Amino acid sequence: MEAYGAILNLVIPVFFLLYFIEKIVAWRRGAQVIRGLDSVSSFSSGITNVVKDVLGLSVGILSYQWLVGKVALVHMEATWLVYAVAFIMVDFQGYWVHRWSHEINFLWNRHIIHHSSEEFNLSCALRQSISTFVNYFTFLLLPAALLGVPGQVIAVIGPLHLFLQYWYHTRLIGKMGWLEHVIVTPSHHRVHHAINPEYMDKNYGQVFIFWDKWFGSFQEEMPAVPPVYGVKRPVHTWNPFKINFQHFWLMFTDAWRARSWWDKLRLWFMPTGWRPADVQARYPITGITDVYHFEKYDTPASPVLVTWSWMQMFFNYFLLIYFFAYIGKIGSPGIFLYGAFIFASIYAYTELMDLNRKAQVFEIIKSAWGIYLIWQSGGDWFGAKANVGAWYVYAVGAWCVLSAGVVVWLAEWEVTKDNSVSSWHGTEA
């Protein structure tokens, strides 16, 4: 937990740096590949994911350490060759987990967040799930366990393998010559994220592309078919919590409404998007039928609201740095309260980004809770006085007060700036 938090404090600034380099390059080329609120939503999703992972809010049905202890035919030392073999094994596992997450209805819920952006840039790589509470797929590492690859090697490879999947989420890098035959490139992954019929459910590889070529899921990017990004049933929100559980809620309500008990059971394991015929007839849902002619989700946000959303996201990153640096000292149950506060903050400001009229209420509750956490600890913020100094406590308290006031004002200003309230969700014109 502490080691992973320390690694994240080193890696996350690199993600931000590469994103802003991409933004500058896109601006110099005159390419429109980034939208402000979309990127804020993506980074916010990334924050929720790493908080969830660091807190360990998921369980494995089968642990790799147990598996290797039971089935290893030989035992290997942690040499560079063992690390290389382990990396290939982890990538093999990643291919099949990724593929099944696209092909099986209930597993799509854990992956929809990653495809929910209707843009394709480095920030969308950070749209990662918080809805995965159970890891079913350790058995795919059976080959590594049989070879006796040590558990600590898999523990090192896992984060590295994940971080290496960041760079290829971009439209600014073309095809890469002979590397196209070996590793996953931006061209391959643009195909994977596309909703064009020619590209759907292709290129599941995470680091190596040869799995797709061997298992029949490869598709080359075609100049005559420009990729269009998103999901066939658009999510229509910037709120990562809603995106994470949107598909699950649809499956749950479909199971409740289905007349056939067989349909209630099998819909979870059917191909992604399958719905019982009687439910589809009574509660039709239409997705995108023409990928070249649909309106991307957006909200009529002013530059002020976009700027404020970036400020909110970076304040939560400011909280995250301290959290990861001192998670061991904060201890339990403090770490879970801290994580819950970050979740509440992200929920509140992404609701404002969606122009939800209840965003003011969420923000006031969140800010009041922040002040209460400081008050009930005797004027401290999870040990910040001793760890970094009283200035940190003052900064958090001041931000909570400022944030509540700004959101109340900003929400009202956004409603009235055009002398119209029709743009606000849940508000009748």
Image (cartoon, rainbow, N blue to C red):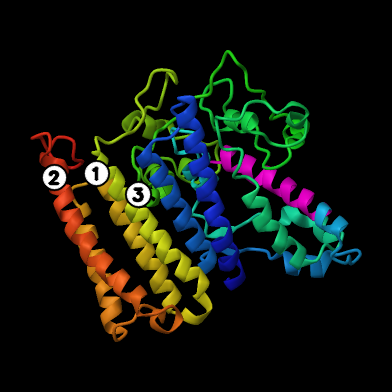
Q: Is residue 354 visible?
A: no
Q: Which residues are magenta?
A: 85-105
Residue hosting label 2: 413
Q: Residues within 10 Å of mark 3 (few under 14, many from 20)?
A: some
Q: Mark 1: which secondary structure? A: helix
Q: Residues within 10 Å of mark 2 (few under 14, many from 20)?
A: some
| Quadrant in which residue 354 is drawn | top left
Q: Is residue 103 magenta?
A: yes
Q: Earlier in the sequence, mark 1 or mark 3?
A: 1
| Quadrant in which residue 420 is drawn | top left
Front-lying residue, 313 or 274:
313
Q: Mark 2: which secondary structure? A: helix
What's the amino acid at mark 2? Trp
Q: Mark 3: which secondary structure? A: helix
Instruction: Report how far apart the C-alphas of labels 1 and 3 lie in the structure.
Output: 10 Å
Residue hosting label 3: 310
Front-lying residue, 428 or 391:
391
| Quadrant in which residue 156 is drawn | bottom right
What main secondary structure does the magenta stretch of the protein show? helix
Q: How many marks?
A: 3
Image: 381 above or below 101: below
* Residue under the point 50% across and 49% down: 16
Q: Earlier in the sequence, mark 3 or mark 2?
A: 3
Instruction: Report how far apart the C-alphas of labels 3 and 2 lie in the structure.
Output: 18 Å
Residue 222 x %, y %:
62, 18
Residue 263 x %, y %:
47, 40
Instruction: Report how far apart the C-alphas of labels 1 and 2 lie in the structure.
Output: 10 Å
Residue hosting label 1: 304
